[in-house]
Image (spheres, rainbow, N blue to C red):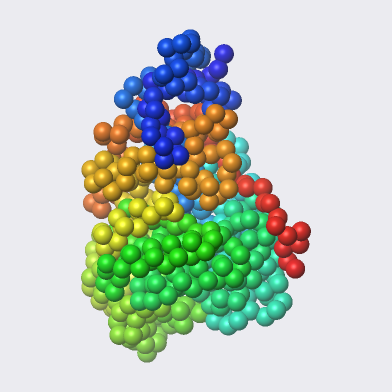
Amino acid sequence: MEELVIRDADVVDGSGDPSYRADVVIDGGRIVSIVREAAQAGCQRPKARRELDAEGLVLSPGFIDMHAHSDLALLRDPDHSAKAAQGVTLEVIGQDGLSYAPVDDRTLAEVRRAIAGWNGYGDDIDFDWRSVGEYLDRLDSAFDGRGIAVNAAYLIPQGTVRMLAVGWEDREATPQELDRMRQLVAEGMEQGAVGMSSGLTYTPGMYAKDAELTELCRVVASYDGYYCPHHRSYGAGALEAYAEMVELTREADCSLHLAHATMNFGVNEGRAPELLTLLDEALATGADISLDTYPYTPGCTTLVAMLPSWASEGGPEKILERLADDATADRIRHHLEVTGSDGCHGVPMEWDTIEISGVADPALAEYVGRRVDSWATARHLLLADRLAPSILQHVGHEENVRQIMRHRVHTGGSDGILQGAKPHPRAYGTFPEYLGRYTRELGVLSLEECVAHLTSRPAARLRLPDRGLVKEGYRADLVLFNPGTVAAGSTFEEPRKLPTGIPHVLIDGRFVIEDGRRTDVLAGRSVRRSPVRRNANPLT
C-alpha cells in the first residue's frame, strides 16, 4: 500500500492550467497517481497507509526560490523555517558572483570578509571544502548526514572565480588567468552547478570586461547551464546594463536569467515597459531569457557595496585602509554624494534611503533600524564593524514591481539575506506575499499564473525534468496552502515573523511542515543537474 494520499485537494499543478479537485497519491518520494474528482465516481478511491484531508486547501508544487543567500544558513540552522515555512522546497544559492566555492585558503578568508553582511563571518562553520563538488557534498552530509532543510542548487560565483585566478586588481585577465577561470567554471559545471552568477557592481567581479564574461559564458553554455548576472547598474544606465547582458549572452549562445530584475531609483520610475520591450524583442529573436523579482520595493545589500569600485580594489583590508585615511575617505564621499558611485549604480547617494538592517558587532546594535544620516555615520560604521553592516535601500517603485511580475518569463526570487537583527522581510515572506497580497488581494496575477511563476517556470530554467509540476512520476515536493488566508507574516517592523495559511510542506514526500509546525525532517539535498555538453570539449 502506498505511503500517503492527499484527499480532496484543489490542485493547482504549476502548468498555469485551471485548477481541479483530486486525490493525489505519494509513495517513495514521488507522485504515483492523481485521481480527479470526475473519475472517482466510477472507481474506488485510492487508499494509503496515511490519509490527509485537504478540503479547502490548494495543493501545488513546492516553490523554487531562484535567488537565495542561504549558502551558510543551510549549514548553520537545521530548522531553516525562514524558507521551509514559506513553502520553498528548493533554493538557488551561489548568487551575485560571491560565494564559498571554488576557493583556496586565501580566497576563502577574503570572501568570508567580503560577504559577512550577507551570511555572517562564518565563525560557527567548519569550512572543510574547497571545490564546488565538495561544498555540495557538505550540504548532503550536513547535521550528521541527515541533510539540510530544503533542497539547494548552486551557481558558480564569477567574482570568487576571478578572486582565485586574478585577485582583486582592476585589470584585464592575462590569457593564462582567463584559461584558469574557464577551467574553474568547467570543473564547477562538471561537479553539478546549474550555471554561473556575477555581481557586476561588486568587486572583484565588476572588474571583468564583457569579453572575459563572454568566454566564461561559452563554457557555461557548453554544459547547457545559464548565466545569472547582477548586472552593472540597476540605477542610472539600468536599461543599457540589461541590454549589455542580452547581447553578451547572445554572443556566447548562453541562456540568461536576470537576477532581481527591478527598475529601482528615481531615474527609473515608470520605465518598466522599456525593460519588458527590450526582453520581448530579444525573446522574439530566439533568445532564452528569464528573470526573477521579489514582491517589495526596497532593496537589500551591504553598506560596503555602495563604495566606488576603485575604493574596493585590493580587497577588504585595502578598503579599510582607504576609509581610515581622511583624504581618501573624502574622495570616496565625493564619488558617493556628487558624481554617483558605480557601487550605487551611478546614482548620487541619498542617505535617507539607507537603513541599517544588521551589524556584526553587538556594540553597534543601536544603529539597526536607523537611517544613515550622513557619510560620517556610514564611514564610522564601516570602520567600526569592519565592513559587515547590511542595509535596506528604499528606492523602489510599486508600479514597476507589478508590471515586471506579470511578464511571461518572470519567476520568484526572495534575494533573502537572513543575517542581521532587522533583515528585509522578503527573506521570510516573498512567496506568501505573492500568493496573498499580489494574487488574492490585488489580482495582479491569477492563482494559477502565480503558482506557475513560482514552480514550473523556475524548474524549466534549471532544466529539472521531474520538479515544478503536480504530475505523476514527479518528485513529491509539494505545498498545501489556504488560498483565502495565506499571507506573509513578516513586516519591516517584525521581519522574522512566519507566514500564515501554509499548513503543510513536503519534500521528497516527507513532511517538513506539518499542521503549521516545523518537523525535525531534513529532506533537503543538493540538486546537481547532470551537465549535457553541447561541445565535447568546452574549453576549445
- The image position of residue 119, as x and y in percent, is 45, 56
User: Which one is nearer the viewer's eye here, 267 or 415?
Assistant: 267
Looking at the image, residue 485 sits to the left or right of residue 201; the answer is: left
- The image position of residue 64, as x and y in percent, is 46, 45
User: Which one is nearer the viewer's eye here, 368 or 252?
Assistant: 252
- The image position of residue 25, as x and y in percent, is 50, 22
Quarter of the image where one finds residue 143: top right
Which residue: 27% across, 68% down?
269
Q: How many labels does the image show?
A: 0
Looking at the image, residue 130 sits to the left or right of residue 449; the answer is: right
Quadrant of the image containing the N terminus: top right
Looking at the image, residue 310 sits to the left or right of residue 437; the answer is: right
User: Which one is nearer the viewer's eye here, 52 or 356?
Assistant: 52
Q: Which residue lies furthest to the bottom in this view?
A: 327
Which residue: 55% across, 33% down?
475
Which residue: 40% across, 72% down?
239
Please say if 454 is above or below 186.
Answer: above
Quarter of the image where one finds residue 450: top left
Say whether residue 301 is visible. Answer: no
Quadrant of the image containing the C terminus: bottom right
Please say if 518 is above or below 136.
Answer: above
- The image position of residue 400, as x and y in percent, is 30, 61
Say whether residue 349 is visible. Answer: yes
Which residue: 58% across, 30% down?
473
Please say if 333 is above or below 525.
Answer: below
Quarter of the image where one finds residue 498: top left
